[in-house]
Image (spheres, rainbow, N blue to C red):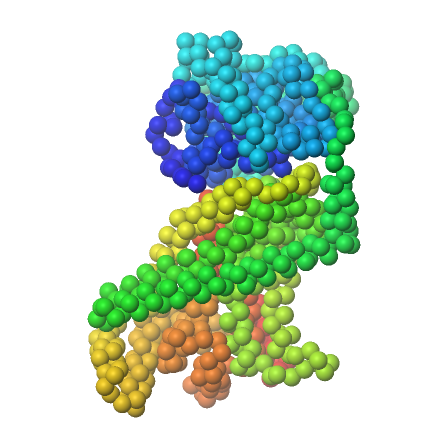
Amino acid sequence: MATADISDPELDRAGRLLRVALVGNPNTGKSTLFNALAGMRVRTGNYPGVTISKKIGRLRLDGDDVDLIDLPGTYSLAPRSPDELVAVEVLTGDLSGEPPIDAIICVVNATLLQRSLFLVSQVLELGKPTLIALNMSDTAASRGLQIDLPRLAENLGRPVVATSASKRSGIAELREALSALLDESTPGGVRDRDAVGPGDPPRAQTSSSDLALPDDFYAACDRLREKLIETSCVRVETASADVSSGEDFGTTTSQDRPDAVGLPDDYFLQRMLLDRGGAAERYLVNRLGAAILIPLNETREQLTARFDDIVDMECSSRYTWAGKKLQGVLSQGGGRGGMTDFLDGWLTHRVFGLFIFAALMLLVFQSIYSFAGYPMDGIDAATSWLAETVESTMAPGVLRSLITDGIIAGVGGVVIFVPQIALLFFFLAVLEDCGYMARAAFLVDRIMQLFGLSGKSFLPLMSSFACAVPGIMATRVIENRRDRFATMMIAPLMSCSARLPVYLLLIGAFIPATTILGFIGLPALVLMAMYAVGVVVAIPVSLILKGTILKGETAPFVLELPEYQWPSPRVVFSRVWEACREFVVRAGTLILAASILIWLAAYWPGDHSRQFELQRRLEASADTDSSAEIAALEAELRTTSADLLENSLLGRMGHAIEPIVRPLGWDWKIGVGAIASFPAREVIISTLGTIYALGGDVDEEDEGLRGAIRSAKWPDGTPVYTIPVALSVMVFFALCAQCVSTLLVIRRETNSWRWPVFSFVYMTVLAYVGAWATYQIGTRWLG
């Protein structure tokens, strides 16, 4: 998809661009409808002052530009999380720095109409010009569900358009209806510039038929507003809200003002009354001060005396309202809805469903592991060829080293992830678009409750065993912000494929090839234990996070099982393209910069003249000198490179941290390997090869490297590497955030540096403690 800077100055000129919000339940095809309406004219960015991302598409309707804003899917406009709060603020026009919304398209599921009208009733109370998109209407027809669209539009008092976003049907009619809605010159029409000033919100459309709750409730809201105005006359407090911080919705500053400026939309007052302790209440307390709690609690007591339970009152009132609006609208004919029930009987079965799910996941991850290997090998070969081409055309020197070891290696380190990301998001898009993803989340929800998470966290965590980068990006399927952030924080604990070379090197060098119980190999058992470490540790970490910094009201795990359908190729490939593009453009630039910085630390300071001379002699005499002379030059080059690395900034850092890593059983060389592996964990293999004068082209199966680490000695002659030391290194790499790509993707997904910094700090401390305990216990046990 094409992107543009969200801060385009044209977008901020009041009255120049119309703004339409797209809102709906999850699994209603809202995002598919957004893509169908916006096409390729889509851009992403952040809301002003907050770290919540937004997606905007540009429409052209009758010569006017229209911004289409895709809001997060929600079952209710009762904000429980910062994400939902931002969505409500956008709809009500209370979000600072955001122009008001001119109209709303409310997307509803035609197969679950009464349930969808719960959200519609809340949207209509906002008083904005509203259009109802009855999506998945083809599926409803196939199940024999007949909907009288004119009658529904008459009952709701709003235009209703039947659509099928996946099949691109009804899109033209929806555009025409939206254009007509915006063109109305009657009260509520937003193109009537004489009636509505530029930048002013559209006039209220709310009528008595839109009000789903009892009259006594709205009367109580009016009385509360009057009390708040009286309270706010002396002192009005405003807030600078940064909803990214979880429970902290902003810091308050006081201003002496004689008016009630700053009071939000009536809808916030309603939500504050209905949701005790919810996001709306915290928002208004931060905005107007704690004094509002006195009239608020008085009004709640009056409503409780009148309705007993005001939450139950809202639910029953809205569903009663929905039932009245559907009178004479729905009829059931003959259809083939039994196929969905038949498939669900197998796919959601508590036993067979889990087997089918496990088989599908095995197929997905085996496909990612197998098929991604071919393009990844091709990228690796292309990177090597490009580096060799540069080496053959440039004389050894600083510039050549920067290009080959810094830039080319950095670019290769970015592009190498693209095949895995593309395949993962391909499968994600197919499973979600066909309707299976919701079933998978339902099946594993009970297991994920051990982590304090929901079933939607399973696939991102499983994906992280291949690579945490696409796994973290896959958390986008999790609507709840706290669950999404908790999943991102524990995803790097899953042992990815980059850790495998470290495990294989140390297991092959130090773990004896013995068997337990006659058939279980000890090396295989240790390898399995390394993969299990991250999973076992992730459970208490997630529970601690959900109980502390991500603490909050537990969001109900509500799943709407969508109809099965054939995935749309356009939708699938657009999601794959968007995921790959965002990774390369957003995170890739930072990864490249980090790779160049690590190269600089390994290169500077030092006199590389002798190294360059040896390289020139080797390249010039490859076809003339004897093999013995070439071997001697290569040995001297390896020794020189090892000395230069030891005396570089990276090597000095290794010596500096040796007292810190000594309790883990490590020497400075292991410390250098750990620091150098920050761009990618597997870099420790080539770093150790350089340090031990074996060259940087060794791999984990190189017998020379295994022999070198076996023979490494401390100054007193004792071996550096023992079985406890090897286990200590493996545990450290299993738990540490030794991957700049992962951290930068967390930065990209959270739009904040606090989360990658937190992830790096807590995982480093956790890895250090785990490595220390492994070494100390192992030394006392094994001697």
Q: Determine whether 491 is above or below 81 in the image.
A: below
Q: Residue at x 48, y 63 (%)?
A: 374
Q: Residue at x 75, y 32 (%)?
A: 335
How many badges with numbers are in the image? 0
Quarter in which the C terminus is drawn: bottom right
Tell whether 313 sits left or right of 240: right
Q: Determine whether 152 is above or below 366 in the image.
A: above
Q: Is residue 69 visible?
A: no
Residue 782, horizontal then vertical, whole percent: 62, 82
Q: Is residue 40 visible?
A: yes
Residue 190, horizontal then vertical, whole percent: 47, 15
Tell whether 648 sits left or right of 453: left
777 or 684: nearer the viewer? 684
291 or 43: nearer the viewer? 43
Q: Residue at x 46, y 50 (%)?
A: 580
| Residue 724 picture quarter | bottom right
Quarter in which the N terminus is drawn: top left
Q: Determine whether 328 is above or below 668 in the image.
A: above
Residue 259, horizontal then vertical, whole percent: 48, 15
Residue 643, horizontal then vertical, whole percent: 32, 78
Q: Residue at x 31, y 69 (%)?
A: 388
| Residue 327 picture quarter | top right
